[in-house]
Amino acid sequence: MDLSDTNLADPWLISPMQGFQHNPRHQFQEEVYADPRYVANDGETESHISCVFACRWNDGYGICGRSINAAGIGEHMLSYHFKSPLPADSRLECLWEGCKLHKPVRRDTIIRHIVEIHLGLKNRCKLWVASHGGASFCGSRKNARLQ
């Protein structure tokens, strides 16, 4: 797939797997959409959003290979690789090519794992994490630390 075939910044991408437009107000997908109002305005964050990567998720049928960017990784994973609806506390194994994490992790942290470990980007700001993982991404981790 070449980059001219898709607009990676557009959250209204059509999923060929489900045949409908992803609505960010849908209850099971709301948390994965980046909202530019919450993106920290620094040079590093801006470059994270514009970087394009190939998805290396291998579900047993071969490596995905779709073009993704940091801002759209959560939407991509939910649309193409995670069964929907999937509670945030569900445990998943990381199937990224070459991943050395051999234990299931919570779905709400696997996106951060992919961004930091596999894409090599650091989530240094809670606002950046919230914008890329959804509003409940930070909240669920904060609540976990308090318990």
Image (cartoon, grey):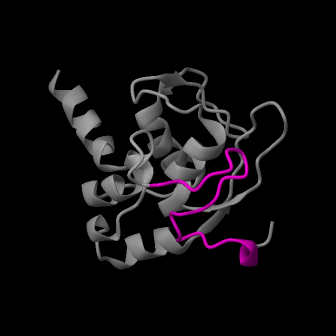
Up-down: is 29 above or below 36? above
Provide residue 20's location: percent of width, then percent of height.
Answer: 62, 52
Can residue 139 be seen here? yes
Image point 48% across, 68% down: which residue? 48
**Residue that protrudes farthest toward the front in the picture:** 20
- Residue 35 lies in what quarter of the image? bottom left
**Residue that protrudes farthest toward the right in the picture:** 61
Which sits in the foreground, 116 or 1? 1
Image point 29% across, 49% down: which residue? 135
- Residue 99 lies in what quarter of the image? top right
Which sits in the foreground, 48 or 137? 137
Image point 73% across, 52% down: which residue? 16
Q: Is residue 94 magenta?
A: no
Provide residue 34's location: percent of width, then percent of height.
Answer: 40, 60
Please give left or right for residue 51 compared with residue 95 in the image.
left
Please give left or right for residue 77 compared with residue 54 in the image.
left
The C terminus sits in image quarter = top left
Can residue 120 be seen here? no
Please give left or right for residue 102 compared with residue 41 in the image.
right
- Residue 4 lies in what quarter of the image? bottom right
Up-down: is 120 above or below 94? below
Up-down: is 144 above or below 127? above
Provide residue 78's location: percent of width, then percent of height.
Answer: 55, 42
Which residues make up the magenta segment? 3-23
Q: Is residue 12 magenta?
A: yes
What secondary structure do most residues of the magenta stretch adopt? loop
The N terminus sits in image quarter = bottom right
Which sits in the foreground, 13 or 57? 13
